[in-house]
Image (cartoon, grey):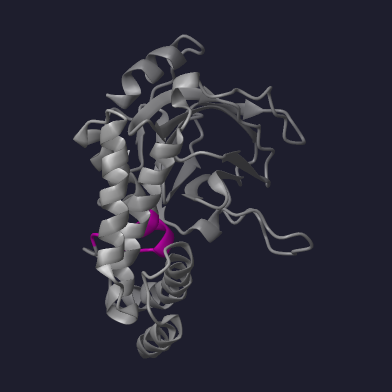
């Protein structure tokens, strides 16, 4: 299990407080709070509420978009910390342009220090968890942790009080050499993303699947020459598909979603899909024959949900 080695390591640092005996999780969400250790899955935001005895409860897990973790633009007056009073929020997302970002919001009355561990995707499989550098978060503030490579999980442990009035950051911890992502691995993840876009854009843009098949066939030939096993290739494609679905905002399980929530989600999703289909046309010549016509069809569909 992912948590066994981590929880054992944390237990050596501080006497473990009494935590709820059962895991705290939400249906259809991957993030969970288990014996004081919080696991954040990519594309999700977890909210913890502080108890008087110094423990925490997981009170919510939401699906998020990349914009929910992006630092504000220069000169912006937007509120950075939107967590409710007495809570902590941890949000993880990624895209190929900015890398992986963990946003930590502290609306508890005390400063926050914690230990962070990341699970990276490299070499066709998950690597970690490995220790990573994280900054303290004074009360009322928000911090942004960043990694250039794909991070699919962040594990948060040893939550504790901090007296810092400004964020204090320890020395940077570099990933282990085996976690480095080679060019073929990056290409495999990218092709997994492209395969998702071919399918999502097809109803509006009429994608040419033959172009995608040629890309995949050429990539598979080169991975075979490099001695890759089939399972490694499939894991890369799966990772890329997960990243692209999260970026567009595709919900794979809509159980418990009200019609109003579904319509609002579609209103938010269509503009992102349009941008991603335009990106596909730019990155894969010939994948879309008429971008303007596809934009028109997508816009017409999106208007039904305004």
Residue 161 quadrant: top right
Q: How far across and how far down the image is residue 282, in percent?
A: 49, 67
Image point (27%, 42%), residue name: 221
Task: Tell me, yes or no, if residue 257 can be seen here.
Answer: no
From what the image shows, is residue 107 above or below residue 177? below
Give the quarter of the figure containing the N terminus. top left
Task: Tell me, yes or no, if residue 20 can be seen here.
Answer: yes
Q: How far across and how far down the image is residue 98, in percent?
A: 57, 50
Q: Is residue 289 left or right of residue 88?
A: left
Give the quarter of the figure containing the C terminus. bottom left
Q: In this view, does 235 lie to the left or right of 243?
A: left
In depth, the one of 179 and 268 nearer the eye is 179
Image point (68%, 22%), residue name: 171
Q: In this view, does 285 lie to the left or right of 213?
A: right
Residues rendered magenta in the picture? 244-253
Image point (31%, 73%), residue name: 207
In depth, the one of 300 and 25 nearer the eye is 300
In depth, the one of 11 and 6 nearer the eye is 6
Q: In the orientation shown, which residue stands out farthest toward the right? A: 75
Q: How far across and how far down the image is residue 95, in percent?
A: 49, 52
From what the image shows, is residue 224 above or below residue 248? above
Image point (46%, 33%), residue name: 181
Q: In the orientation shown, which residue stands out farthest toward the top? A: 12
Q: How far across and how far down the image is residue 92, in percent?
A: 48, 46
Figure disc tally: 0
Residue 265 quadrant: bottom left
Residue 167 quadrant: top right
Residue 294 located within the stretch drawn in magenta:
no
């Amino acid at each position: 299990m992912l948590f066994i080695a981590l929880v054992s390591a944390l237990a050596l640092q501080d006497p473990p407080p009494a935590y709820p005996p059962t895991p705290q999780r939400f249906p259809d969400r991957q993030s969970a709070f288990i014996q004081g250790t919080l696991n954040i899955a990519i594309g999700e935001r977890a909210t913890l509420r502080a108890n008087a005895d110094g423990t925490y409860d997981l009170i919510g897990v939401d699906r998020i978009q990349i914009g929910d973790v992006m630092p504000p633009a220069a000169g912006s007056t937007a509120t950075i910390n939107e967590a409710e009073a007495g809570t902590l929020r941890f949000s993880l997302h990624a895209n190929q342009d900015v890398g992986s970002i963990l946003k930590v919001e502290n609306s508890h009355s005390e400063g926050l220090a914690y230990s962070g561990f990341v699970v990276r995707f490299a070499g066709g499989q998950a690597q970690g968890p490995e220790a990573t550098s994280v900054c303290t978060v004074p009360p009322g503030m928000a911090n942004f942790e960043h990694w250039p490579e794909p991070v699919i999980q962040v594990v948060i442990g040893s939550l504790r009080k901090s007296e810092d009035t400004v964020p204090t950051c320890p020395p940077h911890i570099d990933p282990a050499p085996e976690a480095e992502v080679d060019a073929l691995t990056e290409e495999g993840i990218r092709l997994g993303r492209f395969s998702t876009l071919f399918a999502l854009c097809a109803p509006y843009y009429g994608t040419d699947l033959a172009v995608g098949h040629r890309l995949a066939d050429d990539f598979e030939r080169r991975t075979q020459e490099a001695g890759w096993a089939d399972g490694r290739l499939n894991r890369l494609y799966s990772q890329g598909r997960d990243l692209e679905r999260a970026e567009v905002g595709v919900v794979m399980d809509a159980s418990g979603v009200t019609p109003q929530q579904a319509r609002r989600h579609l209103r938010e999703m269509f503009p992102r899909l349009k941008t991603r289909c335009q990106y596909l046309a730019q990155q894969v010549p010939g994948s879309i024959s008429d971008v303007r016509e596809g934009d028109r069809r997508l816009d017409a569909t999106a208007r039904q949900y305004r």
